[in-house]
Image (tube, helix red, strand yellow):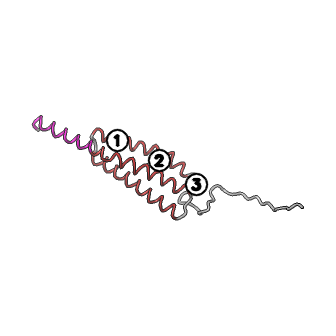
Amino acid sequence: MKILLPICLALISPDSSPGGTGWWPPGMDTWFALIGGPASGCIGALLGVLAGKGIARRLVLGIWRCCIAWGILCLIGALVAFKTGQPDYVGETLLIYGVIYTTIFSTIWPIAKKRYREHEIRRMASMDATGH
């Protein structure tokens, strides 16, 4: 005896997800990676060079604080995304940026502040030596 089961083929669009629509459309995470990754690296490199040379202390440390805050906000956003049932690409993107920004910028923060202190001490010693 043969049992025939009805088969129905349905076209499922790639942007349909069980959690509904996300905070941004699918594929946008790729753009975040393509643009945000190199931009983050350039910002980090620029801040590192300026801190190493002791230039623009207030600007550099201010941007550095903003990067740490951005990482924390991304971590909070990832937590909210996972809790509210956002698609995985939303939560994972925020989690990756949050972990990278928070760990890297928080780890190097004390080193940058130390470099600025060293430059200030050298500048004061130079002014004392020249009599200014």
User: In the image, what residue occupies the spot 34% across and 49% down?
Assistant: 64
The kind of secondary structure the magenta stretch mainly shows is: helix
Extreme-left residue of the structure: 131
Residue to which mark 3 is pinned: 26
Residue to which mark 2 is pinned: 36
Q: Quadrant of the C terminus?
A: top left
| Mark 3 crowdedness (10 Å alpha carbons): few <14, some 14-19, many ≥20 | some
Give residue 93's position: percent from left, percent from top.
50, 53
| Mark 1 crowdedness (10 Å alpha carbons): few <14, some 14-19, many ≥20 | some
- Please, what is the three-letter code of the amino acid marked with disc 3? Pro
| Mark 2, secondary structure of its residue | helix
Give residue 61's position: percent from left, percent from top.
30, 48
Q: Earlier in the sequence, mark 2 or mark 3?
A: 3
Q: Which residues are magenta?
A: 114-131
Q: Which mark is residue 48?
A: 1
Magenta run includes residue 130 = yes
Mark 2–mark 1 distance (CA, rounded to whole Å): 18 Å
Q: Using the image as rendered, state which of residue 72 and residue 23 is in the foreground.
A: 72
Query: Horizontally, is 27 left or right of 125 in the view?
Result: right
| Mark 3, secondary structure of its residue | loop
Extreme-bottom residue of the structure: 84
Q: Quadrant of the N terminus?
A: bottom right
Rendered view: 115 above or below 93: above
Extreme-top residue of the structure: 130
